Amino acid sequence: MSFSKEEIGRLKAEFLTAFHQCGNASEAARRVGAKRGSVTAWLRAAGVVARAQAGPGSGHRRADHPAKAEYARLRAEGLSNTAAARRVGINPRTGRDWHQGIRHTANARIYPDGRVVDYNTGMTQKQAALARLEKSIDARFLALAERELITDLLSTGASLREIARRLDRAPSTISRELRRNTPGKGLYGAYRAQRAAVARRERPKSRKLDTSPRLRTYVIDKLKLRWSPEQICHAMEQEFPGDAEMRVTHETIYQALYVQARGSLRKEIAAAVRTGRTRRKPRRTPGERTPRFSDGMVMISERPAEIEDRAVPGHWEGDLIVGAANGSAIGTLVERSSRYVMLVHLPGRQHDSETVAKALTATISTLPAHLRGSLTWDQGAEMARHKSFTMATDMPVYFCDPASPWQRGSNENTNGLLRQYFPKGTDLSVFGPEDLEHVAQELNGRPRKTLGWENPAERFSSYIQP
């Protein structure tokens, strides 16, 4: 059925009159017998609707209903939804949607929490929250304000190069933006494009350790040798200098080790992290330690500066690691400059001051004279005979301040590494000198970051050679 121009003009006038009376385009179209598609164009031409609505998320916004402001005022005065809706001549459900912040688009409802109910497909989708849509990640990426400007410039017929010039962007950026975010033959919408860009930021992505069997095998093999993740990463750079596949950060390895959240390597490596932790823990201030003795001690504050800056080799830090119920112990010595480790066997279950002094003297005596500079220890009772040790080895002993294990940090770090081999609560007397030598060799063969990824054995051997 076709209408003449006069009939269309009359029908349009009747529709606009009915629309202003009832405030509902569908109802007004039904009253005058007009099609819903036609009246949308009439409303747009009359300035009631800003732009045609292309669908949920298109970026085009309808003008507010003329009765919406009056409805909000009545609700603010205390009127119920039904009473306020009757006063302004709208359906109570429409008023309830206005009050709850629900927006209507073409066959869809958009809720304030981002849910979109699409009546064409019957599906409910979750949109990104407005705060996420408006958040600018980096100046390299188009922001929501720039996409709104693109929409406005496109409506004026501006070319891609003109839009790029206005936004101070490359024309390829605008072309790529339109190609990605324009649906078929539809119109480009700023909010729809922004939601699509936000959705692309977070996507399922396979982790490199899961997709590269070669890389995964290498990491697992080194973890079984008790290498730290950082040591593994730097070793790969040296062994595979031009191989991009054999690259991974130590943080990625840590994330694969911890059970919390990821832990994809934890099933294969039972004790990959030397601490034995399954999740990260914040550092805590250690409790105070009670001094064992005070007579005749030379404190660390009197230690020469050449020892402090590790410039001269031959200065050592030492301590004991103890076994179950403090019934057994192993002496540990670390050379400050090279981080070279020597383990002192304490026979039987004895680790009194006399036994420790004799064992330390025997171990230190195997070193050349120029590598017997000094020994730094804590205030443990096992060093009560430090004067006899000094007389036998010509090595002065410096004592740390109470509750200050960080003053012999190299030794504390080494003791933590040794707990992988000698866990707390075990009987250390079952380990003989050969066992201790094997563990020391393994530790001294690990590359160290502080040595420029050279291992302690190599560095220490350079000190021994004339």
Image (cartoon, rainbow, N blue to C red):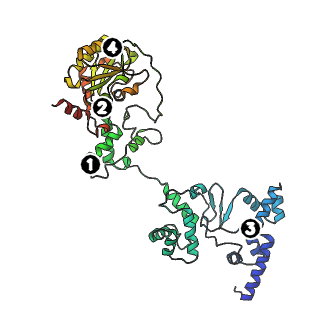
Spatial separation of the CA atoms under disc 3 and disc 2: 78 Å
The residue carrying mark 3 is 65
Left or right position of 259 against 453: right
| Residue occupied by mark 4 | 351
Q: Is residue 313 above or below residue 293?
A: below
Q: Residue at x 48, y 74 (%)?
A: 161
For the C terminus, the image quarter is top left
Number of other residues with Cα within 10 Å of mark 1, as a class: few under 14, some 14 to 19, many 20 or more: few
Q: Position of residue 451 (x, y in %)?
A: 29, 37
Closer to viewer: mark 2 or mark 4:
2
Q: What secondary structure is marked by label 3?
A: loop
From the viewer's side, name the closer residue of 255 and 259: 255
The residue positioned 56% from the left and 56% from the top of the image is: 135
The numbered mark at residue 368 is none
Query: Is residue 217 something that shows in the picture?
Result: no
| Residue type for callout 2 | Arg
Label ID, residue 240: 1
Q: Residues within 10 Å of mark 2 (few under 14, many from 20)?
A: some
* Residue carrying label 2: 310
Separation of residues labelled 3 and 1 (CA atoms): 67 Å
* Disc 4: CA contacts within 10 A as few (<14), some (14-19) or many (>=20): many
